[in-house]
Image (cartoon, rainbow, N blue to C red):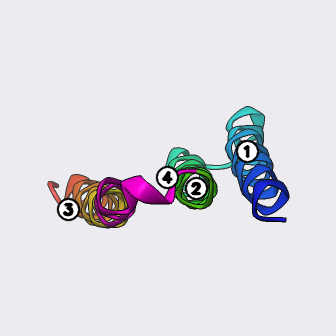
Amino acid sequence: MIEILSYICIVIGIIFWFWGTLPLIGNRSVLFKLHSLSVADTLGSMSIIIGLLLKIPSEWSLLLLAIISLAIWNTVLGYVLAYCSSSGGNND
């Protein structure tokens, strides 16, 4: 049962990865595209790591560190992108 749940998490993660790339071909703004891509990539990567955690529980410390690193990295990157986009329009 754990094996099946592990594979389900990994497949959901891969689906999130592909789902995040679909808005890249749309006509929305660059910031919308980056936001949707980073959210989908974060959720997909976390889902894959959770699937791996179910598959190899002996490596829980490294996999937990990977989940925390993903969450912090993508949050900081989102703030940096928002700051760069807001300060770019104020230089008149």
Element carrying mark 1: helix
What kind of residue is marked 3? Asn
* Residue 24 belongs to magenta span: no
Left or right: where 51 falls relative to 23: left
Q: Nearer the viewer, mark 3 or mark 4?
A: 4
Q: Earlier in the sequence, mark 1 or mark 2?
A: 1
What residue lies at 28% left-to-right and 60% top-to-bottom? 65
Q: Is residue 41 above or below residue 76?
A: above
Element carrying mark 4: helix
Q: Which dot marks residue 32?
A: 2
What residue lies at 38% left-to-right and 53% top-to-bottom? 59
Residue 19 point in image, percent of width and height:
77, 47
Q: Quadrant of the C terminus?
A: bottom left
Q: Which residues are magenta?
A: 56-68
**Which image quadrant for residue 1?**
bottom right
Element carrying mark 3: loop
Seen from the viewer's position, the closer of residues 26 and 90 is 26
What residue lies at 78% left-to-right and 49% top-to-bottom? 7
**Which residue is identified by label 3?**
90
Q: Which dot marks residue 31?
A: 4
Seen from the viewer's position, the closer of residues 58 and 64 is 58
Say whether marks 2 and 4 touch (CB < 8 Å): yes
Q: Kindly report the distance in space between the C-alpha atoms of the residues bearing marks 1 and 2.
A: 8 Å
Left or right: where 33 falls relative to 7: left
Q: Earlier in the sequence, mark 3 or mark 4?
A: 4
Q: Nearer the viewer, mark 1 or mark 4?
A: 1
Q: Kindly report the distance in space between the C-alpha atoms of the residues bearing marks 3 and 4.
A: 17 Å
Seen from the viewer's position, the closer of residues 91 and 62 is 62
Q: Kindly report the distance in space between the C-alpha atoms of the residues bearing marks 1 and 3.
A: 28 Å
